[in-house]
Each structure stands twice: as structure tokens, then as C-alpha cells.
């Protein structure tokens, strides 16, 4: 946000300049991660109290006042986009959040946003147009193929008709769906006031291009975003995200994957606790059957960041409006921010509006259509009487701008703290890589690194510094390989007994080596240890034998019995050595003596000697078995 000239911000600016010197290491600026996070810190600016100048009550009052109806030939004429907004502070906050998004900050933290979500054909695109002035492409079926982020900004201009729109793409996901480290921002076009009627076509072209950049061009939806930034004298300061409509059914079986894709995209946007969820419902449909309500309730169980908007009230059948009125009054399906109801132009009315050359007159007519419904239509008047402050797109517009203002004001200080911490971590990681190297010296530096690595490997192989880790780890790898080969080898039988030759000898090169014996763990709770309860391990298989082990207690001393439950039908029995180990929570281990036994199916269990020094905090016994 732009720093103001106020004295209360000057000191903060000086302090933050010092912070940035401390956090930003110019020697490391060639790192993409550092570039991104430094850019993010710069986006927040030198005004640590950037949002302190936002005075919520005054700003809201100003917006309410500026949007108040004016009398024109006995009629209320008011443009949904003609308010002079919640002041410059909201515009600065929105600009700040947009700068953070463009710098890739939403890869590292959650940013405040208002999300429009609902099913297909719920009037969502018309609603977006009503509150932002943007004309989205509309047709039967799905029109929105990706998230469309719409930002409107009021600017001062000597030209009373000044209006301008930038359309760009923000590519955050690659072809495989993985999130990129930093976004790719692609400028598509700038639309002037004279070209305003071409906006739906331009956005349609942007959708085609973003689908092309998100894959092979054959995809029908993508998680990448189209950004529409509108500036004008009569714009409201607002930023919203229009999501693709939830799909209920598809024509082709191969397109069913898009039902899941769109639902997953909506869920991803709704789950952030920094997101205000604008649930769009068609007034004449049963809210219980609308998927967006279920998804929003999963993401926001108490409805604390949810706002409902009812569309197409002119389709409500007379005599069935009680449920809609109950929702407006907060008696049914209560949400933290309640419900608004809007009446957007129907398709035949839109065609009439699109034919008007004077855009200002078209906007007036759009407002008159809605105003006439709530003032002249019997049903419209009844709805307005139920909740006058929640009827009309202008009322919704003020509410959304006020909510966004409050969100940014509340969340910016915490965002800066998190980003400064991330920047510190990134710079530390870069410092750990060593001194930066110029392009001219890179070949020599790489040769030194290779030589250093080669020397280090040689020293480990030769154990010139008496470091045996290399050989110990190599031995462990060979033992693991031998064990895997042993498992794959067939079982031989001699005199009705299983014989394991060769590989077993490799595993047990020394008689006392138990490092590669087969081990199972008896998990004991602290209560079982204290009560000295018998604990039986469920049956387990090792070395083609099904075993069962049980921990017993005698005179407060534990011991383990080992039984053979199943053997291969060709095998009569096995000779084993085994021992029990008490593994303590403090890392200590105490083992029993090594015991031997010959076991067959159904024979008496083999019993270990007592496990020594078991303490109450020791919560597991390890039974190690090796077949002799």
C-alpha cells in the first residue's frame, strides 16, 4: 500500500526500511524463492500500519451515502457501480492483496478473498455482473471454465467517461496439476470504454488461452485464474472470485471427471479460513438439494464466514415465498452474514440492454429493472418488506466492499509477520548453499565441488580417517539384500524339517549378531504394564511360518511364549533361537537370555527366560527370532 504523508506512518516507514535491510540479502537475490518473497515484502510496502487508516464506520457510512438513490423525473435512478466507495484505504488494501498474489504469496500463505460459488445456471454470472459491472460470457450450460478474479478500482480522472479493463492470466498450476513455486502472469489485452461491449468475447478468448496453457488444449476446466482488473471513475473498490458452477450431470461419460474436478476446485477455495463464501442459490429451488450448501457447511460448519445470495426471485411461484422470506429474516438456514436477494435482468432483458449504445443508460435501465421489481411487483414488495436492507444488488455491493475492507484491515499485519519469517528461512537456506558464484567462475567452482566430493568418497572407502560409517552402512545394505533373497528362496526339507542354508549363514556371520534377526513388537500400554496383564500378539508370518507370541507375568517379571500356528504342509517343524527385549521409552533396552527350541504345529509353546529390568515406563517388548 502507498505510504501516506501522515506523521503517524512516517516513523513506521523508517523502522520498516531498517527491517528490510535486515531481511533482504542482496547477495542472494538471484534465487527465485528470495526474489518472490522479497517482492512480496515490497508489495506490503514500508507502511507496517498500512491499514490503520481504514476507518470502518466512516467508510461504510460514506459508501451508503454515495449509493443512496437520486431522484430523476420522479424515479429512483441509481447505478450499482456508481458509488464512490469505502475510501482510498479499501482501494489500497485491494491493490496490496493483488500485488501479493502476483508475487506468488498465495503459494505460502492464505490471502483474504470473497468467493462466488454455486451450481450451474444459478444466476452467478449475472450476479457478478451486477456487483462489478463486468460482462461475462453467458450461454446455456457451463460458461465459466476457470476461476475468474474480478477487481474493480475507483480512480480519479478528468475524463468523466474514463473506464479501462486489463485482462490477464495467472498460471499457478502446471500441466500435471502441481502448484508452481511462482506464478506466471500473462497479459492478454486492455479494453477501453469504447470497446466495452467486446468484454464477453475477450474473456472467452482468455478462457481458451488459459485452457491451452494449462494442458493440451483439450481440457474443459482448469484451476488457473483469469484476472480482470477494471478501473473507472464510477467503480466500487471490490475484489471477488467467480468459480465455475458445480456440475450436476454431463452428456458424455468421459466428461464425468469434470464433476469431480470442479467440486475439488470449489472445495480448495472454500477451505481457507481467510475466504468469505458467497453461496449463490436460485430462489425457486429447494436449498436442501443444492450442493454448494453442503460444501460450504463442510468448510465452514458454523457459517461464520458465509453469506447467501438468492437469485431469480421473479421465478418464485406465488404462495411459496415463505421459505425465502424466512431465510432473509434469518429464521431458516441461518448464516453469519445472512442472505441477500437480487433481481438480475432476464435473457430477453439482457438482449435489450446489449443493444443500447449508451452504456450509462444501459446501467440505469439495469438498475430500474431490479428497482421496479422490489417497488412495484407484489412479490418483490413483500420480499423487501421482510428485509429491506438485503434486497438489491446495490445493498449487496456495499456489504461485500465493507466485508473485504474489514478482512484486509484485520489480516495484513499477520501476513507481513509470516512473510518476513519465510524470507528469513529462505535467506538462511541460501546462505547454507555457500557463497554465490558469478557465471564466469561457475565452471571452476563446479570442478572444485566435484573434486571435493570425489576426495570425500575416497576417504570414506579407504577409512583414512578411521571413519567406518561407509562400510557399516554398506554391510547393512548387503544384509538387507541377503534377507530379501532368502525370503524369495524356496524352502528345502530334510527329514521332515525346514532347512535354511547359505543365506542364513551370511546373515549371521557371527554367533552373537542379532542385527538382522526377524523381529516383532508386542505393544503394551502403561496400564497393562502396571496391572501385569497377559498380552497376546495377533498371529504373524515370518519365514514361511505362522507364529503367535504372548507376554506373561510371573512374580512381576515378564516372559514370552512362542508358538507355531501353521507350517507349510511339507514341513514338520523348525529349530529356532529367540530372545525377548524390553525396549524402554528412554531408549534403553534389556534382553533376556538366548533360548533355543524345536517347534512343530501344535507343540507346546517355547518359553523365554525372564526379561530383566522392565520398568513401568517401558511400553513394548521386542521378540527377535532367527531360524537355525
Image (cartoon, rainbow, N blue to C red):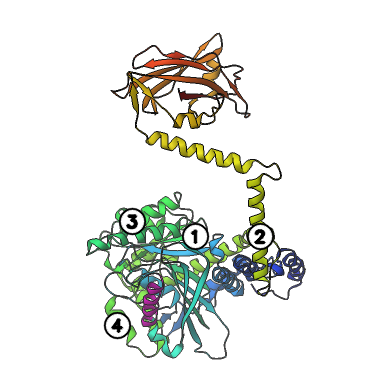
Instruction: Identify the residue position indicated by label 4 in the image.
Output: 351
Instruction: Identify the residue position indicated by label 3 in the image.
Output: 291
Q: Is residue 58 above or below residue 354?
A: above
Counting from the top left corner in percent of width and height, residue 108 is at: 56, 60
Counting from the top left corner in percent of width and height, residue 377 is at: 31, 71
Question: Tag count in the figure?
Answer: 4
Q: Is residue 585 magenta?
A: no
Name which of mark 3 and mark 1 comes first in the sequence.
Answer: 1
| Picture residue at 48% right of the left edge, 16% below the top | 596
Name which of mark 2 and mark 3 comes first in the sequence.
Answer: 3
Instruction: Identify the residue position indicated by label 2 in the image.
Output: 451
Q: Is residue 212 magenta?
A: yes
- Report the side of 485 relative to 617 (left or right): left
| Picture residue at 22% right of the left edge, 64% below the top | 252
Judging from the image, what secondary structure is the residue with disc 1 in? strand
Judging from the image, what secondary structure is the residue with disc 2 in? helix
Amino acid at each position: 500500500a502507498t505510504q501516506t504523508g501522515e506523521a503517524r506512518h512516517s516513523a513506521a516507514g523508517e523502522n520498516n526500511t531498517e527491517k528490510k535491510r535486515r531481511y533482504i540479502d542482496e547477495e542472494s537475490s538471484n534465487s527465485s524463492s528470495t526474489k518472490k518473497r522479497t517482492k512480496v515484502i515490497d508489495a506490503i510496502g514500508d507502511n507496517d500500519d498500512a491499514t490503520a487508516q481504514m476507518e470502518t464506520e466512516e467508510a461504510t457510512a460514506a459508501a451508503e451515502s454515495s449509493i443512496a438513490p437520486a431522484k430523476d423525473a420522479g424515479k429512483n435512478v441509481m447505478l450499482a457501480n456508481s458509488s464512490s466507495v469505502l475510501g482510498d484505504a479499501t482501494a489500497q488494501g485491494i491493490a496490496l492483496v493483488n500485488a501479493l498474489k502476483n508475487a506468488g504469496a498465495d503459494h505460502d500463505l492464505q490471502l483474504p478473498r470473497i468467493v462466488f460459488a454455486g451450481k450451474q445456471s444459478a444466476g452467478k454470472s449475472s450476479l457478478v455482473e451486477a456487483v462489478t459491472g463486468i460482462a461475462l460470457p453467458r450461454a446455456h450450460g457451463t460458461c465459466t471454465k476457470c476461476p475468474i478474479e474480478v477487481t474493480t478500482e475507483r480512480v480519479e480522472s478528468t475524463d468523466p467517461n474514463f473506464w479501462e479493463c486489463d485482462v490477464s492470466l495467472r498460471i499457478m498450476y502446471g500441466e500435471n496439476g502441481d502448484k508452481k513455486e511462482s506464478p506466471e502472469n500473462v497479459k492478454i489485452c486492455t479494453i477501453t470504454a469504447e470497446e466495452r461491449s467486446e468484454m464477453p468475447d475477450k474473456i472467452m478468448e482468455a478462457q481458451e488461452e488459459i485452457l491451452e496453457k494449462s494442458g493440451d488444449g483439450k481440457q474443459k476446466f482448469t484451476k488457473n485464474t483469469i484476472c480482470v482488473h477494471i478501473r473507472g471513475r464510477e467503480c466500487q473498490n471490490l475484489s471477488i472470485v467467480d468459480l465455475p458452477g458445480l456440475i450436476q450431470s454431463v452428456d458424455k461419460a468421459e466428461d464425468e471427471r469434470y464433476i469431480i474436478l470442479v467440486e475439488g476446485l470449489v472445495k480448495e477455495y472454500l477451505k481457507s479460513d481467510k475466504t468469505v463464501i458467497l453461496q449463490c442459490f436460485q430462489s425457486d429451488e429447494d436449498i436442501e438439494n443444492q450442493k454448494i450448501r453442503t460444501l460450504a457447511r463442510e468448510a465452514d460448519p458454523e457459517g461464520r464466514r458465509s453469506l447467501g445470495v438468492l437469485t431469480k426471485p421473479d421465478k418464485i411461484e406465488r404462495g411459496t415465498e415463505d421459505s425465502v422470506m424466512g431465510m432473509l429474516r434469518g429464521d431458516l438456514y441461518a448464516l453469519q452474514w445472512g442472505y441477500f436477494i437480487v433481481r438480475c435482468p432476464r435473457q430477453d432483458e439482457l438482449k435489450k440492454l446489449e443493444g443500447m449504445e449508451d452504456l450509462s443508460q444501459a446501467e440505469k435501465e439495469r438498475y430500474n429493472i431490479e428497482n421496479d421489481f422490489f417497488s412495484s411487483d407484489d412479490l418483490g414488495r413483500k420480499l423487501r418488506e421482510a428485509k429491506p436492507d438485503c434486497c438489491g444488488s446495490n445493498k449487496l455491493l456495499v456489504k461485500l466492499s465493507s466485508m473485504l475492507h474489514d478482512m484486509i484491515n484485520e489480516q495484513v499485519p499477520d501476513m507481513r509477520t509470516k512473510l518476513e519469517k519465510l524470507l528469513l528461512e529462505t535467506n538462511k537456506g541460501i546462505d547454507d548453499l555457500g557463497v554465490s558464484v558469478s557465471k564466469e567462475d561457475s565452471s571452476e567452482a563446479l570442478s572444485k565441488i566435484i573434486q571435493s566430493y570425489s576426495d570425500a568418497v575416497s576417504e570414506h572407502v579407504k577409512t583414512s580417517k578411521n571413519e567406518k560409517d561407509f562400510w557399516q552402512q554398506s554391510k547393512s545394505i548387503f544384509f538387507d539384500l541377503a534377507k530379501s533373497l532368502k525370503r524369495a528362496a524356496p524352502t528345502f526339507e530334510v527329514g521332515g524339517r525346514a532347512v535354511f542354508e547359505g543365506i542364513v549363514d551370511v546373515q549371521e556371520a557371527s554367533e552373537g549378531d542379532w542385527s538382522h534377526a526377524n523381529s516383532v513388537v508386542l505393544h503394551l500400554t502403561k496400564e497393562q504394564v502396571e496391572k501385569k496383564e497377559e498380552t497376546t500378539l495377533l498371529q504373524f508370518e515370518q519365514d514361511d511360518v505362522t507364529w503367535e507370541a504372548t507376554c506373561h507375568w510371573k512374580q512381576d517379571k515378564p516372559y514370552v511364549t512362542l508358538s507355531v500356528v501353521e507350517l507349510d504342509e511339507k514341513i514338520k517343524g523348525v529349530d529356532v533361537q529367540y530372545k525377548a527385549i524390553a525396549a524402554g521409552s528412554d531408549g534403553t533396552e534389556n534382553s533376556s537370555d538366548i533360548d533355543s527350541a524345536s517347534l512343530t504345529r501344535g507343540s507346546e509353546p517355547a518359553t523365554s527366560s525372564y526379561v530383566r529390568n522392565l520398568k513401568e515406563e517401558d511400553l513394548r517388548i521386542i521378540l527377535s527370532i532367527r531360524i537355525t
